[in-house]
Amino acid sequence: MIGHRPRPGGKRIVAAVLLGWLLALPAAARASSDDPLEPLNRDIYQFNDALDRWILKPVAKGYDRITPEPVQTSIGNVFDNLTTPGVALNQFLQGKPKRGLEGLGRFLVNSTLGVAGLFDVAGRHGLPAAEEDFGQTFAVWGVGQGPFLMLPFRGPATTTHAVGMVFDVFTNPLRLVSPNRDRAIAVAVNVIDTRASLLAAEELVSGDRYLFIRDAYLQRRQYLVDDGAVEEDPFLDEDF
């Protein structure tokens, strides 16, 4: 089972890293100016990497071996569905009411016809998943992304994204799960499932892993803030 393609979703970090790297390679040369805390960030990255190498990755591999891929997909769908209310709220806050209504529709369809989000019925009927969070909303409002920040246990972020994560928590119905033990179990399953979905993608990360992840993450965040608009690159022009 190890080696299946990563599922789409807001928390598929390495997959997002790879997409960002492919989207805007020239931006890598500018990324160092966005990382004034690089020495500290590298230390935190080393801590996270060790934690992943010795604990999270082995657990994810075991989960990947024993859990059929359709089951993994359904588990991922459930957690992605739980983020949809927050996505819709941020679409409204960013002045995109049509997309916000589509997000609410997606949540209602998948929560009912999709059996609590196990199946992405909405996606198959013209309501695809979107990625929006408060960090993007603050950037759209003109706050700016802020410098790169590696968070312990969490991974790459920007200062604006990190602040936005606090607000994101309150828009996720997962926080309403009780008792606390059940909520902790749900969070752990989400983390392990997400990590398992990235086992294949991480093989493409090369060179200085910290720089690769940092540069591509910053590009990916800008891509999301710009709603997928990519600056023209003369090196991609066939006539160049």
Image: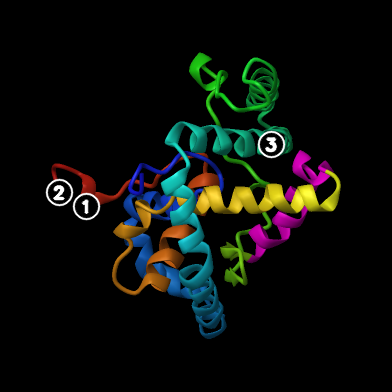
> According to the image, label 1 marks what residue?
235
Q: Nearer the viewer, mark 2 or mark 3?
A: 3
Q: Earlier in the sequence, mark 3 or mark 1?
A: 3
Q: Position of residue 79 (x, y in %)?
A: 63, 39
Q: Main secondary structure of the magenta part?
A: helix
Q: Earlier in the sequence, mark 2 or mark 3?
A: 3
Q: Residue furthest front?
A: 66
Q: Nearer the viewer, mark 3 or mark 1?
A: 3
Residue at disc 1, secondary structure: helix
Q: Is residue 223 left or right of residue 100?
A: left
Crowding around mark 1 (Cα neighbors within 10 Å: few <14, some 14 to 19, many 20+) is: few
> According to the image, label 3 marks what residue?
82
Stretch of the chain drawn in magenta: 159-177
Q: Is residue 121 left or right of residue 84?
A: left
Crowding around mark 2 (Cα neighbors within 10 Å: few <14, some 14 to 19, many 20+) is: few
From the viewer's side, name the closer residue of 74 and 7.
74
Q: Is residue 197 visible?
A: no
**Residue appearing at x 40%, y 52% in the figure:** 20
**Residue appearing at x 54%, y 32% in the figure:** 74
Q: Position of residue 238 (x, y in %)?
A: 15, 42
Q: Quadrant of the N terminus?
A: top left
Q: Please say if 111 is above or below 46.
A: above
Q: Residue furthest left?
A: 239
Q: Position of residue 190 (x, y in %)?
A: 61, 48
At label 3, which amino acid type do we have? Answer: Leu
> According to the image, label 2 marks what residue?
240
- Whole-angstrom CA distance, mark 3 to mark 1, is 40 Å
At label 1, which amino acid type do we have? Answer: Phe
Q: Please say if 28 is above or below 33.
A: above
At label 2, which amino acid type do we have? Answer: Phe
Q: Nearer the viewer, mark 1 or mark 2?
A: 1
